[in-house]
């Protein structure tokens, strides 16, 4: 689900979880970047995306 479609309590819960867990915060960003790349059909960036630390 797109973050803009979360209910306010769901957004607060997601924010709390990602604040408490750096790995989850990194995963959230990585997934968001992938979704943006796919929505905008920027497959040429896939190789660089797979090498994000």
Image (cartoon, grey):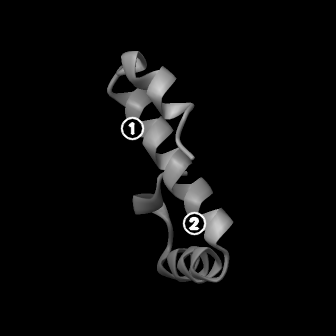
Crowd rating for badge 2 (residues with CA inside 10 Å; few <14, some 14–19, many 20+): some
For label 2, the SS is helix
Residue 17: mark: none
**33 relative to 10 in the view: left or right:** left
Mark 1 highlights which residue? Answer: 36
Quadrant housing residue 48: top left
Q: Earlier in the sequence, mark 2 or mark 1?
A: 2
Position of residue 40 in the picture relative to residue 28 (left or right): left
Q: Residue at x 61, y 80 (%)?
A: 13
| 41 to 51, vertically: above or below | above
| Residue, disc 2 | 25
Residue at the spot 38% in from the left edge and 16% down from the top edge: 44
Residue 28 placed where, x, y %?
A: 56, 57
x, y percentage for residue 42? 35, 21
Q: Nearer the viewer, residue 47 or 31?
A: 47
Find numbered disc 1 in the image and state the secondary structure of the residue it sits on.
helix
Nearest to the observer: residue 7 or residue 28? 28
Callout 2–callout 1 Cβ contact below 8 Å: no
Q: Is residue 18 above or below residue 51?
A: below
* The image quarter in which residue 43 lies: top left
Between residue 25 and residue 38, name the one nearer to us.
25
Q: Residue at x 47, y 52 (%)?
A: 2
Seen in the picture, residue 38 relative to 44 is either above or below; the reply is below
Of circles 2 and 1, the one toward us is: 2
């Amino acid at each position: 689900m797109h973050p803009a479609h979360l209910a306010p309590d769901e957004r607060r819960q997601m924010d709390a979880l990602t604040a408490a867990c750096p790995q989850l915060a990194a995963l959230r960003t990585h997934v968001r970047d992938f979704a943006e790349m796919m929505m905008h059909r920027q497959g040429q960036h896939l190789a660089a995306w797979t090498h994000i630390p």
